[in-house]
Structures are given as structure tokens and as C-alpha cells.
Image (cartoon, grey):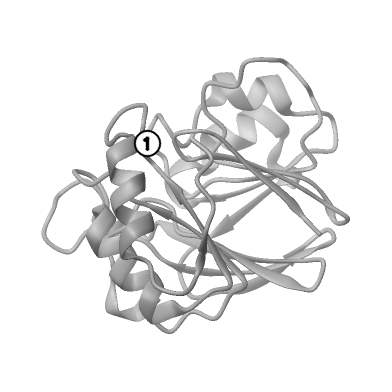
Amino acid sequence: MSQITVLKHSSIHIQAKEGTIYIDPYQIEEASHDAEYIFITHSHYDHFSPEDIEKIKKPETKIITVASSEEEAEKIVGKDQVTVVKPNQEKTVGTISFQTVPAYNRMKPFHPKKNEWVGYILELEGKHIYIAGDTDALPELAGISCNIALVPIGGTYTMTAKEAAKLINQMQPKKVIPTHYGLIVGNAKDAKEFQKLVQNIEVEIQI
């Protein structure tokens, strides 16, 4: 089964039979140059970090990103290695099939809907893994079907622990891993509150 590691904040590493995958790599400590796929949810510095991508890329690395980061991504790996996405698409890049879903704030200015930033549902080893990106608990996310969900809980820029728990209770994945806390916003108390409010779903706290 895919091995999922939350490195820091919303920086995620997945090792699966389909390849070595990073989502929103940030504050990468070692230059591993092992990424076959890099998925970017949006272009904020703590999610699209050229400096960190340079540490993990190799000649064949493919970047999947949104339009606001397209030009910078092409500078890093070349135009042919970049796939640009927007919400509500289904795509296959290399060995990975995935869907994109909306990720935005309704009442806050940080992640406008018009930017067409995304979350991802990756199909890996026959399982569906949802990575929310920076988003509020949107009504259109409640119906997502997945085995594992990674959702932000830190508040301020994203949903709070309470809002995230409500969404996960509606979504009903087998397992959930909270992200986006402990570095820029949010702390361990948020993770504990989230875990307490999630009902009958495995909560794996990594950071």
C-alpha cells in the first residue's frame, strides 16, 4: 500500500508502485532528486516553492500544477514536463490517473475561487487519496469518495479543525491525515481537537 508522509505543513511525500510523488514540497531538508511526480495545489510560496522543487527534481520529473505557476514550473523542468490543471478535470500523467477538485475560500480573500486552484484525488495502487490543498469546507467536497483524505485544519487561511472534522464526517473516508498546521498556522491542539471530533474514522496524526 502507498506510504504517505506529511513532511511539514502541507508538504506531502507518497511512495507508491506508480512512483515517488510529492505534493506542495516545502522546506525540504535533503536534496534527494527522487521525485517522479510533483503535484502543486496553488502558487503561494509555501505550496509552490521553486527552491524546494530543485532539491527533489530529476531529469524526468513531471510537474502537475495550476495556471498561476505554469511559467515558473516550465523554467524548472521544461515545458514538455508540465501539465496544467483546473478544477473538475480527470487526467492521466505517466502512470498516475487523478481528478482535480475545487479548493477556495468563500468569505476570505486568500484563495479566491476565480484563481481555479485545486485539490487532487490520486488513484494509487487501487486506492483513492484526496489531498485537499488550501480550502474551506466547501459543500461540493462533501461527496468526495476516497479511501484516505488529507485535509488542512489550521484555520486562518483554510478550514478550522472543527470545520474539517465536519467535512470528514460527511465524506467518510477510511482514514484521514490532518495537514497545514504546526508551522505557519495552527498547532498540536488543533490536531487533538480534530481527532476528538472525527467519528468512526481512523485519524493518523503525523506532525
Image coordinates of residue 103 in percent, x first then y, are 36, 61
Residue at image point 79% right, 24% down: 33
Q: Is residue 195 above or below residue 169?
A: above
Task: Name the one closer to the observer, 202 or 34.
Answer: 202
Image coordinates of residue 182 in percent, x first then y, are 36, 31
Q: Mark 1, residues whose alpha carbon is within 10 Å: few (<14), some, or many (≥20)?
A: some
Residue 196 percent location from the top left of the image: 33, 59
Which of the pair 98/5 is nearer the observer? 5
- The secondary element bearing badge 1 is classed as loop
With 33 as the anchor, is 158 left or right in this view?
A: left
Front residue (pair 83, 124) = 124
Residue type marked 1: His
Q: Is residue 111 left or right of residue 87?
A: left
How many marks can you see?
1
Image spot of residue 158 (x, y percent): 27, 51
Q: Label 1, on which residue?
A: 44
Residue 20 at least partly seen: yes
Extreme bottom residue here?
Answer: 143
Task: Residue lying at the far top in this picture: please name it.
Answer: 30
Q: Quadrant of the N terminus?
A: bottom right
Q: Is residue 54 above or below residue 141?
A: above
Q: Residue at x 28, y 79 (%)?
A: 139
Q: Is there any visible trace of residue 159 in the rendered image?
A: no
Dividing the picture into quadrants, the one containing residue 97 is bottom right
